[in-house]
Structures are given as structure tokens and as C-alpha cells.
Amino acid sequence: MSARVVIIGGPTASGKSALALQVALAEGGEIICADSRQVYAGLPIATAGPTSDELARAPHHGYGALDAAADTMNAGRFIAFADALIDDIHARGRVAVLVGGTGLY
């Protein structure tokens, strides 16, 4: 099987996270945050971040990875961030599932 990346995007509250979890579970995937807000720590409720149950069911990467008061994410930085995660996921023979709703990344 060749390395795969699944990208799930759409508007807020459209079911992206639930779909990403279904895909990750069905395809042996790991989920990567591609949301401009969920990447910051301390905002899980305000940004509808994954629940503890969802986090336990499949590997999630990048959620709450940055301190909003001390660090920033931008499109250029996100490319390097996501590329490194995708390479790591593929090295384990798994599918990378990127999910987010802002469209920035």
C-alpha cells in the first residue's frame, strides 16, 4: 500500500471530527489537527476540540500543541509541522488524516 493522506475540511459543526475518527478507525489512521484554533492549548471547549474518549480511540496529533499566549501558528509553519507528522505517521505504515475547518492550512 502506498502512503496515503486523507483531508477532511468543512464548516464548523459539520461533523468533520466524527468523520475523521471513523476514517482513522477504519483505515488504520492517525488524525492531524489542521484547525487554526484547536492547535492552541487551553481552548478545547471554545473550539470543539476532541473529547477524551475520541483521543483514546485513535491517535491525535497537534491538538493543544501550542501556547496561545507565547506562540503562533501560520500557514508556512503549519506546512513544516504537518509534513513532519505525516512523514512520521507514514513511517509507521499508517494513514494520515488531516482535519480542520478554517481553510487557512
Image: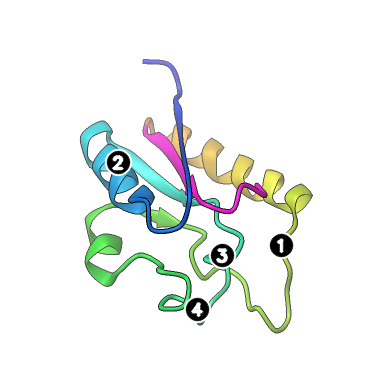
- Mark-to-mark CA distance, 3 and 1: 8 Å
Q: As shown in the figure, which amino acid type bears the numbered disc 4?
A: Leu
Residue 16 vertical position relative to residue 46 in the rendered view, above or below: above
The residue singled out by tag 4 in the image is 43
Q: Which mark is residue 39?
A: 3
N-terminal label among 1 and 2: 2
Q: Residue furthest top?
A: 1
Amino acid beneath label 1: Met
Please tell me the numbered disc located at residue 73: 1
Per the rendering, the mark at residue 3 is none
**Residue occupied by mark 2:** 24
**Cα distance, mark 2 to mark 4?**
23 Å
| Mark before the other along the chain sequence, 4 or 1 | 4
- The CA distance from mark 4 to mark 3 is 9 Å
Q: In the rendered structure, which amino acid carries the disc numbered 2? A: Ala
Look at the picture and state if 34 lies above or below 94.
below
SS label for mark 4: loop
Q: Gap in Å between the C-alphas at discs 2 and 3?
A: 19 Å
Crowding near pointer 3: few (<14 within 10 Å), some, many (20+)?
many
Q: CA distance from mark 4 to mark 1?
A: 15 Å
Q: Are marks 4 and 1 in contact (CB under 8 Å)?
A: no
Q: Secondary structure at mark 1?
A: loop
- Residue stretch in magenta: 94-105
Cα separation, mark 1 vs mark 2, equals 25 Å
Mark 1: few, some, or many residues within 10 Å (few <14, many ≥20)? some
